[in-house]
Image: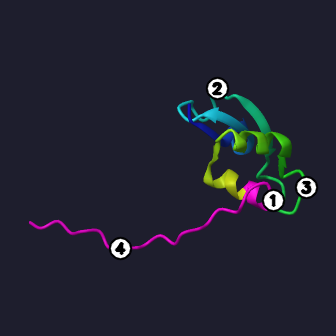
Amino acid sequence: MSLKIRLARAGAKKRPYYHIVVADSRSPRDGRFIERIGTYNPLLPADHAERVRLMPERVTHWLGQGALATERVARFLGNAGLAPPPVRHEQTKQPLPRKKG
């Protein structure tokens, strides 16, 4: 079973609120999860303390069990000092091949 630490959307239309969950990678985004380990409220200012809330001991437990964080959650974990910050690779912009004929 491959585990992911990812966001599960909650909240109303145009009022997003996310739970940070540990889930099987095959489960739907808002579906079945193993444990809720934090929350993310994008409507709060970036410097607000309640914007991202994590349970550090549970995050380290699941990372130790082999769970992989998605790109967005990895950024949260890097900012909190719970994991190394993700390395950003510049995308190579190559022109698409043209069809002949």
* Amino acid marked by disc 4: Gln
Q: Which residue is mark 3?
A: 49
Which marked residue is nearer to the observer: mark 2 or mark 1? 1
> For the magenta stretch, what is the residue range?
76-101
Question: Which sits earlier in the primary sequence, circle 3 or circle 2?
Answer: 2
Residue 49 coordinates in the image, percent (x, y): 91, 55
Could you tell me which residue is drawn at 21 percent across and 69 percent down? 98
Structural crowding at the residue carrying mark 1, measured as other residues with C-alpha within 10 Å and reported as few (<14), some (14–19) or many (≥20) = few
Structural crowding at the residue carrying mark 2, measured as other residues with C-alpha within 10 Å and reported as few (<14), some (14–19) or many (≥20) = some
Query: Label 3 to label 2, Cα distance in Å?
Result: 28 Å
Query: Label 4 to label 3, Cα distance in Å?
Result: 41 Å
Which marked residue is nearer to the observer: mark 1 or mark 3? 1
Q: Which disc is residue 38 wearing?
A: none
Label 3 sits on a secondary structure element that is: loop
Question: Residue 93, relative to residue 53: is it above or below?
Answer: below
Query: Label 4 to label 1, Cα distance in Å?
Result: 35 Å
Query: Label 1 to label 3, Cα distance in Å?
Result: 15 Å
* Amino acid marked by disc 3: Ala
Q: Which disc is residue 94 wearing?
A: 4
The question of residue 26 being in magenta is answered with no
* Amino acid marked by disc 1: Gly
